[in-house]
Image (cartoon, helix red, strand yellow):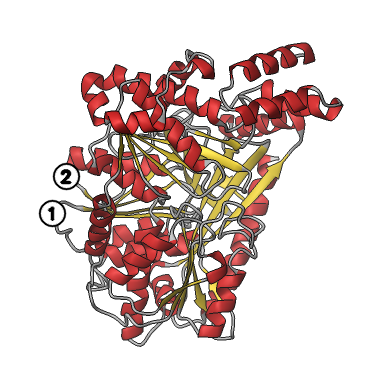
């Protein structure tokens, strides 16, 4: 888009933007020098695209930013699709709306409610900040047609977002996202999107505030998720941080209900603050993000350190290393520990999975880039295991699909990026319930006179040491993107059947939805089409290649399985696994490039 077109679009957008602050922001850019024109091009030459993750972007005026005008038009499209799909039943069921503590979250949530109300769709709005898992729970609890969460999760403070859920309580999947996006494209200019005032919506009953009963019911349900209620050392010392987000109230209440008596929050990070003043990046995976939690845990000699991200859908776990420091577990390690604990009924069984209370075969699910260790454990215990594409929407939908088709009972799901869900309570990541169950696991082990790290080593000795690594290949600009596409195409057209010294057992091509065995036999792959390739090796190790969806980068994931010999020290096996990992990753990168 040339500069004249950008300027014309900016003026038209300013004329149609109902937010005076946004109009002033655009006018200031229009009258500024060349740097303002560069900013205008970024804001107006493109627009935020609505997809399965909804919207997410930097706050500011213009179609390529998160703002009131974009949210009004998006909600107009969502309302149209709800009515088109469910008719009058959808209008009555309505849409439930939650929001976090980021800048403008409350305003964007109220705009969503007012636009829905004007479209004849009842809006159920939380009266206060809520974690994302509580919003996801509310969709099914209230029987809504859809849900909206205003959040940007663990993105930097300048971001916000609009996450959409469907009537099953899971994030939307294709083709729902495409249908909503098509309706959004038909939306009128923001000033012409009908909306009630907030007070009008409430007085007419078209906007209803969500009852506190939803939170109470959620907490009661979380309490029932515990597989060893009341057991273990519930006085163990836990340090918790919500990372300036919205998780503190709900997580602390959930721990109280579970009988934990010594949970302390990091005071500097306890209250919601969308500026996230004590961290450079509000993601517990980032280096330094948990430093304040570690300092408090060191002072209190804590047994367990837990952190939610700002919307409390993710969970980070750290444990004392016995040397005045802490070991932060990976998402894969937490997923394996929780999955094994739940499958075995809280370690009640050592050799088989327990039948869930509701009957049916126990089922655990992980994303394809998560560690395969949980699958090995599930198979050994006689449970069912499944893999899905990255994103909890796929885990939730696969769990529902398998329950309807086979009667399987979903026990646990996870992805390596610190996302976990326990049972069928919430059909999305839930960092609150995961925190409580991890606390229970730690308490049970402590009562038995052992630790989580010792227990994890025991799992490695029984099922094999699994180590994960990732290599990113980054290129610049359009030519770089072209080169990365060529790399993926080369790997797809002629997938290597030997990687260094490692024999390949099979190659899964998620784009062509086929699995090719070493002898050339092809079988269908029952997963949605995606630009991903996966090599299964004879050793039990694995390689996955996929492009980044947001930047010119190819991502290579490596998972090594290394048996531990007899009573050899764990560091010896770890050293051997590291050597295997280096040889495997070096060999694959050489083949790919």
> What label sits on residue 407 in the rendered view?
2
Q: Is residue 300 above or below residue 146?
A: below
Furthest residue toward right: 33
Residue nearest the observer in this picture, 169 or 242? 242
The answer to which of 570 and 446 lies nearer the viewer is 446
Is residue 243 placed above or below 298 in the rendered structure?
above
Q: Are marks 2 and 1 in contact (CB under 8 Å)?
A: yes
Disc 2 secondary structure class: loop
Residue 496 visible in this rendered orientation of the protein: no
Binning the other alpha carbons within 10 Å of mark 1 as few (below 14), some (14 to 19) or many (20 upward) gives few
Classed neighbour count for the residue bearing mark 2: other residues with Cα under 10 Å, few (<14), some (14–19), many (≥20) = some
Q: Tell me the quarter of the image containing the N terminus.
A: top right
For image coordinates 23% across by 44% down, the residue present is 141
Residue drawn at x 19%, y 37% as measured from the top left: 405
Left or right: residue 298 compared with residue 462: right
Residue at 58% in and 27% down: 19
- Residue 58 appearing in the image: yes
The Cα–Cα distance between marks 2 and 1, rounded to whole angstroms, is 8 Å
Side of 414 relative to 477 (left or right) = left
Residue drawn at x 76%, y 31% is 477
Image quadrant in which the C terminus is located: top right
Task: Give the left or right position of residue 223, taking residue 57 as reference.
Answer: left
Q: Position of residue 437 (x, y in %)?
A: 33, 66
Count of marks overlaid on the render: 2
- Where is residue 205? Give x, y as percent: 27, 31
**In the image, is residue 192 above or below residue 233?**
above
**Disc sitting over residue 359 in the figure:** 1
């Amino acid at each position: 888009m040339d500069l004249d077109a950008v300027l014309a679009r900016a003026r038209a957008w300013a004329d149609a933007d109902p937010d005076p602050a946004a109009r002033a922001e655009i006018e200031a850019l229009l009258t500024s020098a060349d740097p303002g024109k560069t900013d205008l091009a970024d804001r107006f030459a493109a627009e935020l695209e609505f997809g399965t993750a909804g919207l997410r972007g930097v706050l500011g005026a213009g179609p390529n930013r998160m703002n009131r005008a974009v949210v009004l038009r998006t909600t107009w499209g969502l309302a149209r699709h709800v009515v088109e799909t469910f008719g009058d039943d959808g209008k009555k069921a309505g849409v439930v709306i939650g929001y976090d503590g980021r800048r403008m979250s409350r305003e964007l949530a109220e705009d969503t409610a007012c636009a829905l109300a004007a479209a004849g769709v009842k809006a159920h709005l939380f009266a206060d900040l809520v974690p994302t898992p509580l919003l996801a729970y509310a969709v099914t609890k209230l029987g809504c047609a859809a849900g909206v969460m205003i959040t940007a999760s663990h993105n930097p403070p300048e971001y916000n977002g609009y996450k959409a859920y469907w009537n099953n309580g899971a994030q939307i999947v294709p083709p729902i996202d495409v249908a909503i996006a098509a309706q959004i494209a038909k939306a009128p200019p923001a000033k012409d999107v009908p909306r009630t005032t907030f007070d009008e919506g409430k007085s007419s009953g078209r906007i209803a505030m969500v009852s506190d009963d939803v939170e109470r019911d959620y907490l009661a349900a979380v309490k029932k998720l515990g597989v060893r209620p009341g057991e273990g050392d519930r006085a163990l010392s836990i340090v918790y941080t919500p990372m300036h987000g919205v998780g503190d109230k709900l997580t602390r209440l959930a721990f109280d209900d579970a009988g934990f008596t010594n949970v302390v929050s990091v005071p500097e990070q306890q209250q919601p603050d969308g500026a996230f003043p004590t961290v450079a990046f509000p993601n517990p995976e980032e280096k330094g993000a948990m430093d304040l939690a570690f300092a408090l845990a060191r002072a209190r000699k804590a047994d367990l350190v837990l952190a939610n991200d700002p919307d409390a859908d993710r969970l980070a776990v750290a444990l004392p290393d016995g040397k005045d420091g802490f070991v932060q577990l990976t998402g894969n390690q937490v997923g394996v520990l929780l999955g094994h604990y739940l499958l075995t009924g809280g370690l009640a069984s050592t050799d088989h999975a327990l039948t869930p209370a509701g009957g049916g075969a126990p089922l655990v699910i992980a994303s394809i880039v998560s560690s395969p260790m949980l699958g090995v454990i599930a198979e050994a215990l006689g449970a069912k295991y499944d893999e899905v594409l990255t994103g909890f929407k796929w885990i939730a939908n696969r769990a529902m699909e398998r329950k309807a088709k086979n009667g399987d009972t979903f026990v646990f799901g996870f992805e390596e990026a610190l996302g976990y869900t326990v049972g069928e309570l919430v059909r999305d990541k839930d960092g609150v319930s995961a925190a409580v169950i991890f606390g229970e696991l730690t308490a049970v082990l402590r009562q038995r006179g052992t630790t989580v790290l010792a227990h994890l080593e025991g799992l490695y000795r029984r099922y094999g040491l699994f180590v994960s690594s990732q290599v990113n290949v980054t290129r610049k600009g359009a030519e770089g993107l072209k080169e990365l596409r060529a790399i993926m195409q080369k790997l797809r057209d002629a997938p290597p059947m030997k990687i260094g010294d490692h024999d390949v057992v099979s190659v899964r091509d998620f784009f062509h939805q086929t699995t090719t065995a070493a002898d050339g036999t092809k079988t269908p792959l029952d997963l949605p089409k995606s630009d991903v390739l996966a090599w299964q090796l004879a050793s039990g190790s694995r390689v996955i290649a996929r492009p980044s969806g947001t930047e010119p980068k190819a991502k290579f994931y490596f998972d090594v399985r290394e048996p531990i010999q007899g009573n050899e020290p764990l560091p010896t096996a770890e050293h051997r696994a590291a050597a295997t990992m280096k040889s495997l990753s070096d060999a694959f990168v050489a083949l790919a490039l």
